Image (tube, grey):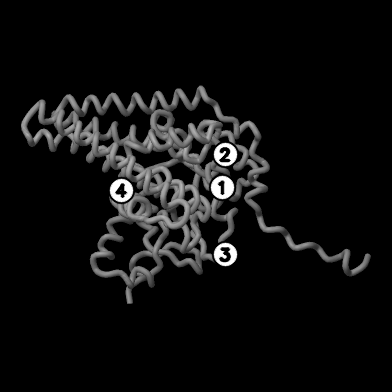
């Protein structure tokens, strides 16, 4: 045997295309019936508590209705998110229309979401300096913050701060405030104007309804209880949802030079077993998150099947388990700052001089 033939080739880096190749073709089959039923269900679950909010001011009823409305907005958003990925239906035009409508109650601009979420977050998941969704700060970054920013960081990375983080960092900074360059600019500005106008008309209509059924104070209270508070509840729910997808002591974030598509999509998110009733009513398998990151074209009703195939082929790579409040609180307690060189989470004490 010659020296040349005895040399073993270097093992090829694990590829995301290899993962996609083991996903059954049937996992990409979209269903108009399942999509339609899900959209009807999500719409009913939104409209019914909204009617309830319009009809009552009982404090205990309001608390329950706000929770249900926030969950309903999240359910609509998940389906809109699927449509924005062109995973809900075969028609790209219908997907875009559905995404815009379903994201309306959460006041999200679909074209801006497409850029920030579909292109950047999915394109560079957990890569330092690229993925802006729950990207951790290094001790050096934290030390550069002012006193107020440090307090804000401590709250946003606490058990109760995920909604504030999502509202400020994702919804405001990366969508409404962000001025997209290039060819996307005009489309995003146009969608912002359309959504803002629709929201203004809805708020005015609610204010008029409130004034007709009470005093001028009711004209303020009606849009507050039907738009503002449900929106804030949604923010808390969805900020927490994205947090548990991408933050955990076992989830690694990657320095730029070490990152790969395989690592970002396979090792930096989760498959969580969530209560079936809650998943069916509002979350549409969004917690089966690894296959969604492997290939966002997979529709929500096919994610469990795709997850089973991926887990079977990569049992030592995929992070899966049952969601528990204990695991969430452990993540909140452990995951504060990050050392990208060592690939480890750090406490705030690591930033002390």
Mark 3–mark 1 distance (CA, rounded to whole Å): 19 Å
Mark 3–mark 2 distance (CA, rounded to whole Å): 25 Å
Mark sitting earlier along the chain (2/1): 2
Mark 1–mark 4 distance (CA, rounded to whole Å): 27 Å
Judging depth in this view, the residue of 96 and 24 nearest the camera is: 96
Say which residue appears at 44% left-offset and 34% top-offset: 97
Say which residue appears at 18% left-offset and 38% top-offset: 224
Contact between labelled residues 1 and 2, with CB atoms less than 8 Å apart: yes
Whole-percent x, y for residue 281 in the image: 39, 28
Contact between labelled residues 2 and 4, with CB atoms less than 8 Å apart: no
Report if residue 271 is visible in the image: yes
- Disc 3 versus disc 2: nearer the observer: 3
- Disc 1 versus disc 4: nearer the observer: 4
Q: Which mark is residue 318?
A: 1
Contact between labelled residues 1 and 3, with CB atoms less than 8 Å apart: no
Whole-percent x, y for residue 315 in the image: 61, 46
Q: Which residue is mark 4?
A: 163
Judge the density around disc 2: few (<14), some (14-19), many (≥20) Cα neighbours within 10 Å: many
Judging depth in this view, the residue of 261 and 105 nearest the camera is: 105
């Amino acid at each position: 045997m010659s020296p040349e033939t005895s040399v073993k080739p270097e093992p090829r880096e694990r590829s995301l295309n290899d993962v996609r190749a083991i996903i059954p073709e049937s996992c990409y089959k979209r269903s108009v019936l399942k999509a339609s039923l899900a959209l009807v269900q999500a719409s009913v679950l939104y409209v019914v508590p909204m009617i309830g909010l319009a009809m009552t001011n009982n404090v205990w009823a309001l608390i329950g209705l706000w929770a249900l409305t926030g969950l309903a907005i999240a359910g609509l958003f998940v389906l809109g998110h699927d449509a924005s990925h062109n995973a809900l239906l075969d028609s790209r035009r219908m997907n875009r229309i559905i995404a815009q409508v379903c994201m309306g109650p959460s006041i999200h601009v679909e074209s801006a979401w497409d850029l920030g979420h579909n292109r950047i977050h999915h394109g560079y998941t957990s890569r330092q300096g690229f993925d802006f969704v729950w990207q951790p700060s290094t001790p050096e970054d934290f030390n550069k913050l002012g006193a107020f920013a440090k307090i804000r960081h401590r709250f946003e990375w606490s058990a109760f701060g995920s909604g504030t983080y999502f509202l400020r960092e994702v919804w405001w900074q990366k969508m409404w405030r962000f001025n997209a360059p290039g060819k996307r600019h005009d489309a995003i500005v146009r969608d912002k104007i359309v959504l803002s106008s629709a929201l203004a008309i809805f708020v005015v209509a609610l204010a008029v309804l409130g004034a007709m059924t009470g005093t001028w104070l009711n004209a303020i209270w009606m849009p507050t209880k039907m738009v503002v508070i449900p929106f804030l509840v949604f923010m808390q729910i969805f900020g927490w949802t994205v947090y548990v997808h991408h933050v955990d002591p076992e989830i690694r974030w990657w320095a730029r030079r070490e990152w790969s598509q395989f690592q970002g999509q396979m090792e930096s998110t989760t498959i969580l077993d969530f209560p079936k009733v809650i998943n069916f009513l509002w979350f549409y398998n969004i917690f089966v998150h690894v296959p969604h990151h492997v290939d966002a074209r997979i529709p929500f009703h096919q994610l469990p099947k795709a997850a089973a195939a991926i887990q079977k082929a990569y049992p030592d790579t995929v992070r899966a388990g049952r969601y528990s409040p204990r695991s969430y609180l452990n993540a909140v307690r452990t995951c504060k700052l990050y050392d990208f060189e060592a690939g480890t989470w750090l406490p705030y004490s690591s930033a002390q001089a």
